[in-house]
Image: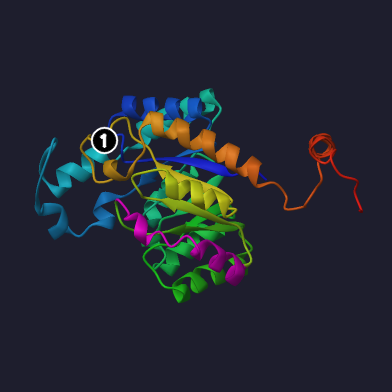
């Protein structure tokens, strides 16, 4: 089964629907299977003291002004929904609170995503599982026992899911990737395992592909120098094109593991062995 490639737009649109559409275009042109956004009810996710704290941004001098500008509302998501349907590319979003999860229901999306930060909120996890949509579950920011609790909920509910190996730093130091955790998760939970990467380059994602991941998620951006907390851990259009192309080649090259003596090899073998008689 082909690796499901997700272009994580997240909040890299910087509150601009035109940038979001450009990123959707890029994801589609590069051959991604889906784009993903993030949805927050700002007042529910962040305490008042955090929102009122000073923060310089292009949109004001407080955290509140910055976060409110980055948050798309109903009009923008209606535009995203229509645009993605026109482009024939799936879209979905990771909700960061129950109100956002409810907000997203109106779009009848095919997939859910639980961000690593939300795994500790088991009430939220249960509400996601109750929707019975195929769910991608990032596994950063927690120990195995935390993942155990989430997996138990999904299995009790009967909701289809896969785990995604993830290290919750932005950008991730490649030395911390620990890709062998992909196999650890496969063995422990007997489920599909993908990779959600926050590294700056492409090599780690190539290596994850060779380990037999079921999905690959990477943040994308128009320009890594743009304002935003996720931009530095994102891939620009040229890099995304290289990534998707290489992933498709790698998954083809991995094959099925059955040793064969190919017909093309037999022709070469006859030539290279012409100087001796087999068996003597």
Q: Main secondary structure of the magenta part?
A: helix
Q: Residue 74 sits in which quadrant?
A: top left
Question: Residue sitting at 31 percent across and 56 percent down?
Answer: 173
Taking the spot 27% from the left edge, 36% from the top edge, the residue there is: 224
Task: Classify mark 1: helix, strand or loop.
Answer: loop
Q: Position of residue 128 (x, y in %)?
A: 50, 58
**Residue beneath label 1, please?**
14
In the image, farthest residue toward the bottom: 145
Q: Is residue 93 left or right of residue 163?
A: left
Which range is magenta?
Answer: 171-189
* x and y, in percent, of residue 162 in the image: 57, 57
Q: Is residue 2 visible?
A: no
Residue 167 located left or right of residue 5:
left
Q: Residue 123 falls in which quadrant of the image?
A: bottom left
Decide which of 142, 70 is in the foreground and name it.
142
- Magenta-colored stretch includes residue 43: no
């Amino acid at each position: 089964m082909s690796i499901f490639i997700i272009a994580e737009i997240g909040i890299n649109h910087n509150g601009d629907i035109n940038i979001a559409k450009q990123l959707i275009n890029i994801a589609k042109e590069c051959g991604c299977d889906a784009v993903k956004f993030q949805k927050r009810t700002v007042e529910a996710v962040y305490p008042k003291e955090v929102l009122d704290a000073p923060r310089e941004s292009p949109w004001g001098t407080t955290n509140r002004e910055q976060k409110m500008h980055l948050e798309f509302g109903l009009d923008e998501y209606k535009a995203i929904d229509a645009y993605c349907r026109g482009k024939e590319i799936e879209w979905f979003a990771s909700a960061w609170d129950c109100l956002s999860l409810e907000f997203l229901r109106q779009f009848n999306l095919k997939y859910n995503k639980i961000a690593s930060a939300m795994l500790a909120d088991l009430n939220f996890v249960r509400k996601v599982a109750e929707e019975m949509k195929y769910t991608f579950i990032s596994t950063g920011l927690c120990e195995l026992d935390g993942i155990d609790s989430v997996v138990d909920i999904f299995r009790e509910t009967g909701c289809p899911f896969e785990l995604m190996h993830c290290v919750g730093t932005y950008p991730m130091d490649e030395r911390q990737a620990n890709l062998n955790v992909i196999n650890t998760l496969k063995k422990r939970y007997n489920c599909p395992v993908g990779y959600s990467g926050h590294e700056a380059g492409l090599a780690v994602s190539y290596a994850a592909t060779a380990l037999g991941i079921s999905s690959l998620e990477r943040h994308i951006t128009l320009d890594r120098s743009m304002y935003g907390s996720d931009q530095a851990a994102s891939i620009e259009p040229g890099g995304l094109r290289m990534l998707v192309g290489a992933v498709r080649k790698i998954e083809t090259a991995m094959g099925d593991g059955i040793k064969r003596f190919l017909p093309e090899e037999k022709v070469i073998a006859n030539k290279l062995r012409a100087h001796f008689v087999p068996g003597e």
